[in-house]
């Protein structure tokens, strides 16, 4: 009598959807004993009502495990996992639209000689892509039952359950007769291609077009050029498209400051509202359009299927520094925020690869740095073209992002040659289908990211700015004395200025660096609040941050400030997450130390080179 069965296959084959369709609400979720890998089990009923425990195994590309997930799958299939019964029947789930890739693992499973059924899943998506698959021909080639299914629409489930029951009724000795010797990966790939070609009756022009597009985008030389050209266009758009919206927000903040100044009586509340909330926090909020445009491009790349191709392209580049394309996704996530980027390293099997990726993730230019870059570039870099359609401001922003990427690669190279020495791991990744991005999903994604930015502005940035304003406002200055000089914050900044003055930083910058550890954007609000508190009159206080920077900073100081933020460690939350992911303070402290050292050296070199060049 059949008691257990398991769903197994590559990631993204639709196993979870099939599991949900077969078991409904009869599921339980836990972790496998001794490892934090999710265990999903449910109850499946055979045609005559017999219950069977169905296990949804983690996605795997081979029995030669390359990650904790794949190790669990291998041990369960082979009956070597404590506390987990060996499945009596394997249900191998294949993506009908990506048959060749998925057949590689299927052959390895069939060679075990275990009772097995193949679920040819997502057959509707294959038909949509113009593929006609002959299930009977596939069954003849594989020597096991093949059942076409559409899990999300519950098509083919009855036939799959019946085939599973028949496979479970086959005596173990008879199933063992189908056992075959395991062959090399290269041989399995060649066989998979031959079987896929035999089972594919027709390919529409659309499917062939996608293959041609992949040949171009994944070309070893043209692919990287296309990727970097796309990134260049993105950063040009961040400035060119966002300027009218940013100017409108800046005007709205200025109008609110004038309104508050007119209608509220002089005193603590008005000063807090105008100098801390509106001037400080408002100076960050005005860069919301740049954030939205940047994420719009990222979401389109994800939804269209190009992001996975970018990871494949970067695998070759990253192999030179001892990493693989598997590190690209966490590093790419760090462009939004290093916290999810560091957490995403859990998918990296090799512990040294994972540690290296964690240590270099803060060098990726997170969205919190964008307001800092944007305000300095807008203040000191002329808004003019240096070529046809190439804006100088967008070019500088592109260079800053590339500087962070190059620094991360150099840091990875040094780490992999020293403290995280080891061989580079291999990389395999499923290529999703090309598709038009959904406007609804795009709008939801943009709203979520805009809301995160605004929530930070209303919580972390507001609190840090308000605390700084209080420290800047007390004790009150005597007549004729600068308020910043008299304040608690001013005295703290004067002490720190001794350390940062050799790299061209003034007292206002020294003061902004401290609260910026709470969130990168606070550097902008801190500068705005500091200049507002020290303004001689209300009209000067209401003036925007950019004119004040232009009046008080030299170009070498501005360039050094940009260089500092390319390398400086990210917020305290990032350091805390790194501590949690590395199970101690050793590596986060090493990360913080080397990043501060790089920031100081880079800012100093930039400042003195700019001074020597007469800028």
Image: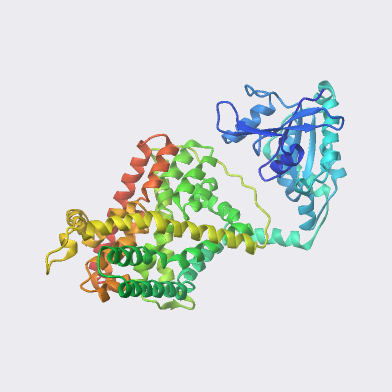
Q: Give the residue drawn at x 75%, y 48%.
A: 152
Drawn side of residue 440 relative to residue 506, left or right: right
Residue 593 appears at what percent x and percent y?
Answer: 31, 45
Please say whether residue 208 is visible from this viewpoint. Answer: yes
Rendered view: 537 above or below 453: below
Of residues 502 and 7, the one drawn nearer to the viewer in this rendering: 7
Residue 17 appears at what percent x and percent y?
Answer: 71, 44
Q: Quadrant of residue 183?
A: top right
Drawn side of residue 81 relative to residue 416, left or right: right
- Quadrant where the C terminus is found in the figure: bottom left
Of residues 298 and 432, the one drawn nearer to the viewer in this rendering: 298
Rendered view: 277 above or below 495: below
Q: Give the residue drawn at x 36%, y 37%.
A: 585
Q: Quadrant of residue 300?
A: bottom right
Of residues 522 and 94, the one drawn nearer to the viewer in this rendering: 522
Rendered view: 259 above or below 62: below
Q: Give the residue drawn at x 41%, y 42%.
A: 578
Rendered view: 287 above or below 32: below
Residue 372 appears at what percent x and percent y?
Answer: 36, 62
Q: Give the residue drawn at x 78%, y 41%.
A: 119
Q: Quadrant of residue 439?
A: bottom right
Of residues 120 and 183, the one drawn nearer to the viewer in this rendering: 120
Drawn side of residue 62 relative to residue 337, left or right: right
């Amino acid at each position: 009598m059949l008691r257990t069965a398991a769903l197994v296959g590559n990631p993204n084959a639709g196993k979870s959807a099939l599991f949900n369709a077969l078991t409904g609400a009869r599921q339980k979720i836990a972790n496998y004993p001794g490892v934090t890998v999710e265990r999903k089990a449910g109850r499946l009923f055979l045609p005559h009502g017999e219950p069977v425990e169905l296990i949804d195994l983690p996605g795997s590309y081979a029995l030669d495990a390359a990650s904790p997930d794949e190790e669990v799958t291998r041990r369960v299939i082979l009956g070597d996992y404590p506390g987990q019964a060996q499945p009596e029947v394997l249900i191998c789930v294949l993506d009908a639209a990506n048959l060749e890739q998925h057949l590689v693992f299927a052959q390895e499973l069939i060679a075990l000689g275990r009772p097995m059924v193949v679920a040819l899943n997502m057959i509707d998506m294959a038909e949509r892509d113009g593929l006609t698959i002959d299930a009977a021909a596939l069954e003849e080639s594989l020597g096991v039952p093949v059942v076409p299914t559409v899990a999300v629409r519950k098509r083919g489930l009855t036939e799959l359950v019946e085939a599973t029951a028949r496979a479970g009724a086959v005596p173990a000795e008879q199933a063992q007769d189908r056992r075959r010797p395991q062959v090399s990966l290269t041989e399995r790939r060649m066989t998979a291609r031959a079987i896929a070609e035999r089972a594919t009756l027709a390919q529409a022009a659309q499917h062939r077009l996608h293959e041609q597009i992949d040949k171009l985008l994944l070309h070893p030389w043209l692919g990287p050029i296309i990727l970097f050209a796309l990134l260049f266009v993105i950063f040009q758009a961040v400035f060119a498209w966002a300027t009218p919206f940013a100017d409108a927000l800046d005007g709205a903040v200025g109008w609110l400051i004038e309104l508050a100044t007119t209608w509220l009586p002089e005193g603590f509340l008005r000063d807090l509202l105008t100098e801390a909330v509106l001037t400080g926090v408002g100076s960050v909020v005005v860069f919301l359009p740049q954030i939205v445009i940047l994420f719009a491009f990222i979401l389109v790349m994800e939804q269209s299927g190009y992001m996975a191709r970018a990871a494949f392209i970067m695998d070759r580049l990253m192999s030179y520094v001892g990493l693989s394309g598997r590190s690209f996704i966490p590093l790419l996530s760090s462009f939004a925020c290093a916290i999810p980027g560091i957490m995403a390293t859990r998918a990296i099997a090799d512990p040294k690869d994972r540690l290296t990726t964690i240590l270099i993730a803060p060098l990726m230019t997170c969205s919190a740095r964008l307001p800092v870059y944007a305000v300095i570039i807008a203040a000191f870099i002329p808004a003019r073209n240096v070529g046809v359609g190439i804006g100088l401001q967008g070019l500088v922003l592109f260079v800053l992002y590339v500087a962070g990427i190059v620094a991360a690669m150099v840091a990875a190279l040094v780490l992999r040659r020293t403290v995280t020495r080891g061989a580079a791991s291999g990389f395999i990744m499923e290529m999703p289908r090309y598709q038009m991005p959904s406007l609804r999903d795009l709008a939801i994604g943009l709203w979520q990211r805009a809301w995160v930015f605004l929530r930070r502005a209303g919580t972390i940035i507001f609190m840090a700015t308000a605390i700084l304003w209080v420290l800047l406002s007390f004790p009150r200055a005597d007549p004729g004395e600068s308020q910043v000089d008299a304040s608690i914050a001013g005295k703290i900044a004067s002490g720190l200025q001794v350390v940062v003055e050799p790299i061209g930083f003034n007292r206002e910058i020294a003061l902004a660096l401290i609260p910026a550890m709470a969130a990168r954007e606070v550097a902008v609000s801190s500068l705005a609040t500091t200049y507002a508190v020290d303004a001689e009159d209300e009209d000067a206080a209401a003036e925007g941050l950019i004119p004040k920077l232009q009046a008080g900073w030299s170009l070498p100081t501005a360039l050094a400030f940009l260089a500092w933020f390319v390398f400086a460690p990210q917020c305290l939350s990032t350091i805390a997450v790194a501590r949690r992911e590395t199970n101690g303070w050793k590596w986060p402290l090493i990360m913080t130390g080397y990043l501060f050292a790089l920031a100081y050296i880079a800012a100093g070199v930039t400042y003195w080179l700019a001074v020597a060049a007469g800028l």
